[in-house]
Image (cartoon, coloured by chain):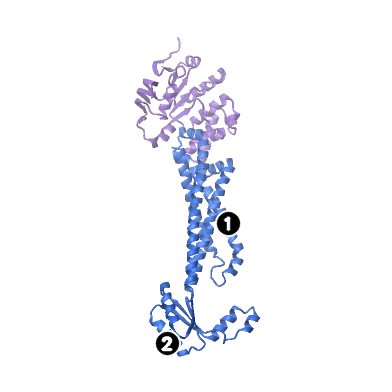
Chain colours: A purple, B blue
């Protein structure tokens, strides 16, 4: 369970990225986080993986108090939460296979098991045939899949996807969303930041809307009868 | 092993920087090796001279054996003498013949009448040499006294001076090589800043990121040392025949392989230490 209470994040003098944001996400939920650019979506994700600390408020993920989490526990937190970054952050000089393998190597998984796991994930996201290629050789959709594959390496309880359909054509975007739905069906909690209203309206999931750092709406869309 | 492979990959991708780091380490340890040879060699040479009969008194031809015996006893009674040896005219001729056995002309010219008999005296303490020498000079049967204090003290002065210069030179080289390795590794760390950020976001600990860089420093140190040591040892082996004829009689050459490999082991340890130091400074500076 993700639990944010009165979270505010201020940068420098006068700039407020998030202001008094509170919400709870239950295990296994699929939640869209929407809002225009600069509304605080990415900041919210960065707070969740403790890439930065909030100026005030509390963040709990399961039993973990993220605000007071000791530095040496951060790597453990980041194994629990998979992230698909907006700019993907794939390692350019490593193949897709190596990119997905990387988090497992860091965690010290056995080589044979790690490789089996990577094969399995690449199969799941549908880019097994590109495993030996480098990021520069892949299309936008394939790169998104690679980033999702890497985020899944630890079989995380929570997956944060920051604008995963941002630069993709409609068809590829809907493929990516389908993939995320498939992952959600296996029990993974998904928070997907997007400003693509088509996708949000089509999926009929819970939507948290941010604007200028404030939570202005938190609603579950119901299918029209 | 994984970290070692990553280090090798880093090195392969920036070969010229790696070459600079290895070159400076080689130069440093070439100097360290030469310095070690010199310190070891000079101490053997000084020991050799110190253990030799330090005062030699040559007797006049007219000196009587009884007078010589009395002098010998007097010397022994001082308690300062560790060893005393009488060399008769005949023995002196034998020694002369042995030293010049390859030169028949010199052998023909010399008979035992020309050579004086002598006393070779070693003192337990170098400081006593002066007193013993004075005592000998005062004896009417003694024609000449020579002692090797001058040789030893000149040699000591020289080796101390060379040691000082060596230590200063090596300290400078060590500092320069640490700075160069620090710069090379620091440059690589800053070049990989983005990749390092990604690694951190993917749950890599700081040490997971630091290890390959630290190992890179060790690889530079160890490779440089091997090169420096091989050059220095090779040079020593080549120079051995020449040095042997120069240092006739001093039990120094050929240098035992045990000493050379011992030196290598110590150098490798120091180099690995310097590598770790330089790379740790670099990663701590650029990778907070």
- Measured in 3D between alpha carbons, the distance from the residue under mark 1 to the one under mark 2, in whole angstroms, is 58 Å
Q: Quadrant of residue A75?
A: top left
Q: In the image, residue A133 lies at what x, y percent?
A: 60, 32
Measured from the top left, where is residue B115 in percent x and y? 55, 84
In the image, taking residue B81 as reference, residue B245 lies left or right, namely right
Residue drawn at x 41%, y 32% is A77
Q: Nearer the viewer, mark 1 or mark 2?
A: 2
Q: Position of residue B262 (x, y in %)?
A: 50, 60
Label 1 packing within 10 angstroms: few (<14), some (14-19), many (20+): some
- x, y percentage for residue A209? 42, 16
Does residue A8 lie above or below B81 as drawn?
Answer: above
Q: Please tell me which of labels 1 and 2 falls first in the chain.
A: 2
- The furthest residue to the right: B105
**Residue drawn at point x = 57 percent, y = 87 percent:** B113
Give the residue at mark 1: B230
Residue sitting nearer the eye, A96 or B35: B35
Q: Which residue is mark 2?
A: B70
CA neighbours of label 2 inside 10 A, class few (<14), some (14 to 19), many (20+): few
Compared across the picture, whether B76 is left or right of B27 comes to: left
Q: Secondary structure at mark 2?
A: helix
Front in this rendered view, residue A207 or A180? A207
The chain holding disc 2 is: B
In the image, what residue occupies the spot 57% across and 19% down? A169
Which residue is most to the top?
A225
- Whether residue B7 is visible, yes or no, is yes
């Amino acid at each position: 369970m993700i639990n944010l209470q009165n979270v505010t994040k201020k940068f420098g003098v006068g700039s407020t990225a998030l202001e008094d944001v509170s919400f709870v996400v239950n295990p296994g939920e699929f939640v869209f986080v929407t809002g225009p650019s600069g509304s605080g979506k990415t900041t919210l994700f960065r707070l969740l993986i403790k890439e930065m600390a909030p100026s005030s408020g509390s963040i709990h993920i399961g039993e973990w108090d993220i605000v007071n989490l000791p530095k040496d526990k951060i790597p453990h937190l980041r194994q629990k939460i998979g992230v698909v970054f907006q700019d993907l952050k794939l390692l350019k000089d490593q193949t897709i296979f190596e990119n997905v393998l990387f988090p497992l190597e860091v965690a010290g998984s056995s080589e044979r098991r790690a490789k089996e796991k990577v094969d399995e994930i690449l199969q799941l996201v549908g880019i097994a045939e590109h495993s030996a290629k480098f990021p520069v050789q892949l299309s936008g959709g394939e790169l998104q899949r690679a980033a999702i594959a890497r985020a899944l390496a630890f079989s995380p309880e929570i997956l944060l996807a920051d604008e995963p359909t941002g630069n993709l054509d409609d068809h590829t975007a809907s493929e990516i969303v389908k993939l995320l739905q498939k992952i959600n069906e296996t029990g993974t909690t998904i928070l997907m930041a997007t400003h693509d209203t088509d996708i949000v309206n089509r999926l009929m999931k819970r939507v948290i809307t941010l604007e200028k750092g404030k939570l202005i709406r938190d609603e579950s869309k119901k299918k029209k009868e | 092993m994984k970290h070692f492979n990553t280090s090798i990959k880093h090195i392969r991708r920036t070969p010229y920087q790696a070459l600079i780091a290895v070159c400076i380490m080689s130069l440093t340890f070439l100097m360290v090796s030469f310095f070690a040879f010199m310190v070891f060699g000079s101490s053997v040479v000084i020991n050799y001279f110190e253990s030799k009969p330090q005062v030699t008194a040559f007797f006049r031809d007219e000196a009587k054996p009884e007078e010589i015996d009395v002098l010998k006893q007097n010397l022994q009674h001082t308690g300062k003498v560790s060893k005393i040896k009488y060399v008769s005219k005949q023995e002196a001729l034998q020694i002369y013949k042995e030293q010049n056995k390859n030169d028949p002309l010199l052998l023909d010219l010399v008979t035992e009448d020309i050579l004086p008999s002598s006393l070779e005296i070693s003192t337990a303490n170098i400081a006593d040499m002066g007193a013993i020498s004075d005592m000998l000079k005062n004896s009417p049967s003694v024609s000449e006294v020579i002692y090797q204090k001058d040789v030893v003290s000149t040699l000591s002065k020289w080796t101390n001076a060379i040691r000082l210069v060596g230590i200063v030179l090596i300290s400078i080289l060590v500092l320069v090589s640490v700075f160069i390795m620090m710069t090379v590794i620091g440059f690589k760390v800053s070049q990989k800043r983005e990749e390092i950020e990604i690694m951190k976001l993917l749950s890599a600990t700081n040490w997971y990121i630091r290890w390959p860089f630290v190992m890179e420093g060790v690889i530079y140190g160890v490779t440089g040392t091997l090169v420096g040591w091989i050059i220095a040892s090779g040079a020593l082996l080549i120079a051995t025949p020449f040095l042997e004829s120069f240092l006739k009689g001093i039990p120094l050459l050929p240098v035992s392989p045990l000493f050379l490999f011992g030196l290598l082991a110590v150098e490798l340890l120091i180099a690995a230490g310097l590598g770790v130091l330089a790379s740790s400074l670099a990663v701590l500076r650029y990778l907070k």
